[in-house]
Image (tube, rainbow, N blue to C red):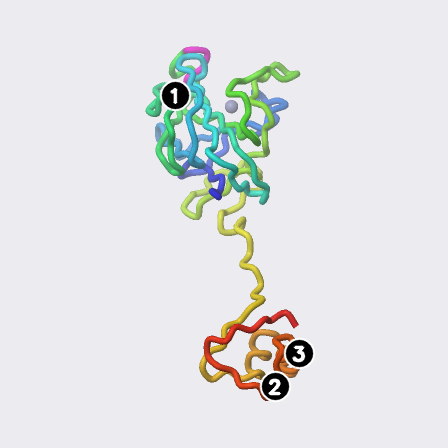
Amino acid sequence: MENCMFPMEFLRVTQRPGIGSHRGSKAIDLGGRDTGKDKVYAPFSGTVVRTRKGANGELYLVSDAPVRFADGSTDYCTVTFIHDEAFNVPEGTHVVQGQYIYDEGGMGSGRPHKFGNHLHMEVSRGKVSARQVANKYGVYCTAIQMDINKAMMLGNDVTVMDAGGMEWHRRTECEAPVQAQNAYTVRAGDSWWRIAEQQLGSGTKLYKLAAANGKTVNSPLHPGDKLTLEV
Ligand SMILES: [Zn+2]
C-alpha cells in the first residue's frame, strides 16, 4: 500500500485552514520556495479524473487503491490542486507516485496571474466527486476534507520552511513499528540460556522457552531450528 505523501519539495504554508478564503475549509495554500513556480508531484499513484482549464485551474487526482494516511488510517484518496495556469498532465492520465504533475500558479476566475504563485490544496478521504461545492460561508470545497497534516506524510527530503503552526509527520515516524519478534531461528553456538537471555530478557526463562517448544533444557539445539518465543 502506498503512503499519501506531501507533494512538494518545500513546505511553506501561506494560508492555513479555516481562515479567510478557507473559512470552514481544511484547504491550505502553499508557497514552496517562493522563487517562482514550484513543481507538484503525485502524492500517490492514481488517475487525473478531471482538469478545469480557466476558472481556478483545478486538477483532481484519485488514488488507484487505498493509501495509508499520516494518522495511520487507510482509504482511497482524492486530492484537489488549484491555481495552475498550464496543465502538463491531461485529464484521464494515469500517473505514478512522485510523478511531476502540476505547478504552482496564480489562476483565478479564468484570469492567469490573478494571484501570486501558489498551490491551493485539499485532501479528501475516499473517491469523492471531482467538483467543488460552496459551504455555508460561500467557500468552495471538495467533499469529505481531511486535515492535510493528518493525511499527508512528509518525505525525509522535504524542507520545512513554514509549517503554518500545524503538526506534520515524517514518513519514517508514520510507518508502523516493526512487529515484536515472536519466532527465532537458532544460530551456531546458541544455547537455551543464551536465547532466553537475548530474546526474552532473562536467561532464567530457559525452562519456559524449552517447554514452549516441546523440549527440555537438555534437548540439543541445531542451527536452523525454528523456536517460538511465545512463552
Ligand atoms: Zn487557498
Q: Is residue 182 left or right of residue 33?
A: right
Sequence-earlier tag: 2 or 1? 1
Give the number of the mark in front: 3 or 1.
Answer: 3
Stretch of the chain drawn in magenta: 106-110
Residue 2: x percent and y percent? 47, 42
Taking the spot 38% from the left edge, 36% from the top edge, the residue there is 96
Badge 1 marks a residue whose secondary structure is loop
Mark yes or no: residue 15 visible: no
Q: Is residue 49 left or right of residue 17?
A: left
Between the residue at mark 3 and the residue at mark 2, the CA separation in whole angstroms equals 9 Å
Residue 119 included in the magenta stretch of the image = no
* Farthest-out residue, front: 214
What amino acid type is highlighted by mark number 2? Val
Nearer to the camera, 117 or 136:
136
Nearer to the camera, 213 or 35:
213
For label 3, the crowd category at 10 Å Cα-Cα, with few meaning under 14, some 14 to 19 and many 20 or more, is some
Give the number of the mark in front: 2 or 1.
Answer: 2
Q: Quadrant of residue 71?
A: top right
Taking the spot 58% from the left edge, 84% from the top edge, the residue there is 193
Q: Are marks 2 and 1 in contact (CB under 8 Å)?
A: no
Q: Quadrant of residue 99?
A: top left
Sequence-earlier tag: 3 or 2? 3
Residue 109 included in the magenta stretch of the image = yes
Residue 220: x percent and y percent? 53, 86
Identify the residue under disc 3: 208
Nearer to the camera, 96 or 153:
96
Taking the spot 44% from the left edge, 48% from the top edge, the residue there is 156
Badge 3 marks a residue whose secondary structure is helix
Identify the residue under disc 2: 217
